[in-house]
């Protein structure tokens, strides 16, 4: 009898709280501060969204909110709340998680 293999997940590197599904990655070509790799996700889970703030990135001005693990409070990335540049609208309501702050779970 074969073992059931569930979805591939990502978890908080600090406490292993599951935060995203591999299948929800929109792009692996994002960069966080200090040239760190990051992934853009269409859906995330077990995260708390902080207060909204305006931030300027390479591609323009955005209204974003930091996202933190609901278990340990570690900031894992940010959520695009409002996108001002028309060419970047695909990011709106999506979440960026820094690669070094998430670990593979159930792979």
Image (cartoon, rainbow, N blue to C red):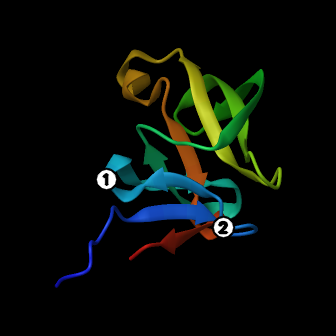
Query: Residue at position x 66%, y 47% from top?
Result: 77
In the picture as drawn, the residue positioned furthest to the front comes out as 1
Query: Residue at position x 55%, y 45% from top?
Result: 96
Position of residue 81 in the picture relative to residue 90 (left or right): right
Helix, strand or loop under label 1: helix
Residue beneath disc 1: 23
The quadrant of the image that shows the N terminus is bottom left
> Reading the chain from its start, which is encountered first: label 2 or label 1?
2
Residue beneath disc 2: 16
User: x%, y% of residue 39?
Assistant: 48, 54
Q: Quadrant of residue 95?
A: top right
Q: Is residue 92 above or below residue 8?
A: above
Question: How many residues crowd mark 1 within 10 Å: few (<14), some (14–19), many (20+)?
Answer: few
Position of residue 89 in the picture relative to residue 11 (left or right): left
Query: Residue at position x 39%, y 15% from top?
Result: 86
In the picture as drawn, the residue positioned furthest to the bottom comes out as 1
- Nearer the observer: mark 2 or 1; the answer is 2
Query: Residue at position x 48%, y 33% from top?
Result: 94
Frontmost residue, 69 versus 99: 69
In the picture as drawn, the residue positioned furthest to the left comes out as 1
User: x%, y% of residue 38?
Assistant: 53, 57
Disc tally is 2
């Amino acid at each position: 009898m074969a073992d059931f293999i569930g979805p591939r997940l990502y978890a908080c590197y600090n406490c292993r709280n599951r935060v995203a599904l591999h299948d929800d990655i929109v792009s692996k070509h994002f960069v966080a501060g200090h040239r760190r790799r990051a992934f853009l996700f269409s859906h995330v889970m077990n995260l708390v969204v902080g207060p909204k703030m305006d931030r300027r990135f390479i591609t323009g001005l955005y209204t974003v909110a930091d996202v933190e693990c609901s278990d340990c409070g570690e900031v894992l990335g940010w959520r695009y709340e409002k996108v001002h540049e028309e060419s970047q609208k695909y990011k709106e309501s999506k979440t960026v998680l820094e690669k070094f702050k998430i670990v593979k779970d159930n792979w």
